[in-house]
Image (cartoon, grey):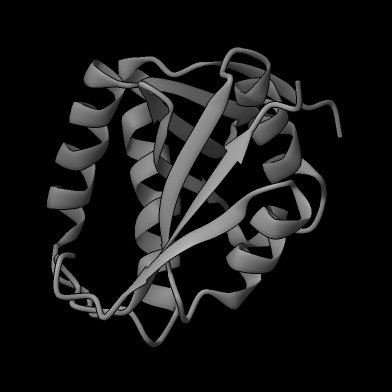
Amino acid sequence: MSLTLSPATPRDAAPLARILGDWLRGTGWIPVLHNRGEDLGFLRRMIASHRVLVARDPDPMGFIAVKQGDIAGFCVAEQQRSRGIGKALLDAVKEGEPRLALWTFQANTRAITFYAREGFAEVERTDGAGNEERLPDVRMIWRRAP
């Protein structure tokens, strides 16, 4: 694997939307609230408004989207997971940020374990009333060591 990380371009919207949409539809526990066209629109808007970093080999295998220290999107294609791609994306973003924060669903125990291993601490849990999916979630924060 010859992994490269680079900023997302508008051409990346379709493959990244497919990666995200496949994950959402594959969980079995997240309600699917949007169709594939809406997934694409979401990724186009995110690429235009956030710093989106893409892992490639040479095709997109995953991405992370950050704005003002908040991780708004982070997903690696199913067949590429557990190969260090998520860690590489997260490490690259950590280089430029003193603090990162994110929300993830409480049911996403694999993500919670990953974030904890990467230095994130849980700071809040909710019943999900504030998110579109209405699923219990957890807020996690990472701070650069002094």
Which quadrant is the C terminus positioned in? top right
| Residue, far front | 146
Residue 79, x across and y down, in percent: 68, 60
In the figure, 90 relative to 30: above or below?
above
Which residue is found at the position 32% from the left and 21% from the top?
50
In the figure, 31 relative to 73: above or below?
below
Which residue is found at the position 22% from the left and 74% from the top?
32
Which quadrant is the N terminus positioned in? top right
Q: Nearer the viewer, residue 11 or 44?
A: 44
Q: Is residue 86 left or right of residue 14?
A: right
Q: Nearer the viewer, residue 114 or 29?
A: 114
| Residue, far right | 1
Q: Nearer the viewer, residue 41 or 69?
A: 69
Which residue is found at the position 79% from the left and 58% from the top?
82
Can you see residue 66?
Answer: yes
Q: Nearer the viewer, residue 47 or 14?
A: 47
How many marks can you see?
Answer: 0
Can you see residue 61?
Answer: no
Q: Is residue 19 left or right of residue 95?
A: left
Residue 111, x across and y down, in percent: 60, 64
Q: Is residue 56 left or right of residue 40?
A: right
Residue 108, x across and y down, in percent: 51, 74
In the figure, 21 relative to 30: above or below?
above
Residue 55, x across and y down, in percent: 63, 30
Which residue is found at the position 51% from the left and 33% from the top?
100
